[in-house]
Amino acid sequence: MLLDLPGLLFFTTYTLLVLFWAEIYQQARNLPAAALRPTFLIINVIVYAVLAGLWALTTFGRTPDIQELAYTISNLWLAAVFLAAAAGFLLYGGRLFVMLQRFPIESRGRRKKLREVGLVTSICAGCFTFRAIMIASSAADRSDLEVDMLGHPLLNIAYYSFAEIIPSACVLYILRKLPPKRNAQGYQQIPSQ
């Protein structure tokens, strides 16, 4: 139950990247982007509220059957949330990738940005899909496929390595270089060597 909280924070952090890409895409297409941030907040509040209710039902349910049902529904809800995050990466990452492909070939930094967006989209969509499959499988067969296996630390390490640590390290490596800072007049500063 509360072991899902770090996964939810992981979800919120990465959906911020989807929000950023959506804003870039909307602004580049001269489409209204004002509703994106409130939509992002509303989606996150709904995700957290539904899970809080299911966790409360799992903890305080009157019978073990109700508690087990709430646990299964909360896992299925989490799987759906992570699958939706993967779809968001594919949707806006794919749109941004296609938009960058259409820029003229001589555009500065085009190839690098194409590679960055393509790799981050692939890694994040794969990571969230993997999580969704593992959590849904855990909901279907809790006895053999429990995701948070406190009794099996090596399996726990393997799961979180493939679901969070390795994808996060890859994304951080890909996005490691920030654009140069602009000074007060709007000119880019040349990095010192």
Image: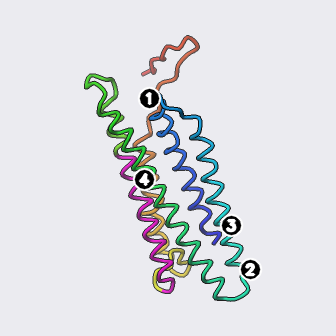
Q: What residue type is disc 4 on? A: Cys
Q: Residue furthest left?
A: 105
Which picture quadrant has residue 46? bottom right
Residue matched to label 3:
52
Which badge, 1 or 3, comes first in the chain's sequence? 1
The answer to whether residue 132 is magenta is: yes
Q: What's the distance in space between the residues labelled 4 and 3, CA to CA?
A: 25 Å
Residue matched to label 1:
28
Magenta segment main secondary structure: helix
Q: Label 1 neighbourhood size at 10 Å, few (<14), some (14-19), many (20+)?
A: few
**Quadrant, the C terminus:** top left
From what the image shows, is residue 20 above or below residue 129?
above
Give x and y (percent) for residue 92.
43, 44
The answer to whether residue 88 is magenta is: no
Q: Residue at x 58, y 60 (%)?
A: 8
Residue matched to label 4:
124
4 vs 3, front mark: 3
Q: Are marks 2 and 1 in contact (CB under 8 Å)?
A: no
1 vs 4, front mark: 1
Residue matched to label 2:
60
Q: What's the distance in space between the residues labelled 4 and 2, CA to CA?
A: 35 Å
Q: Are marks 3 and 2 in contact (CB under 8 Å)?
A: no
Q: What's the distance in space between the residues labelled 2 and 1, CA to CA?
A: 49 Å
Pick the residue in front: 142 or 162: 142
Which badge, 3 or 2, comes first in the chain's sequence? 3
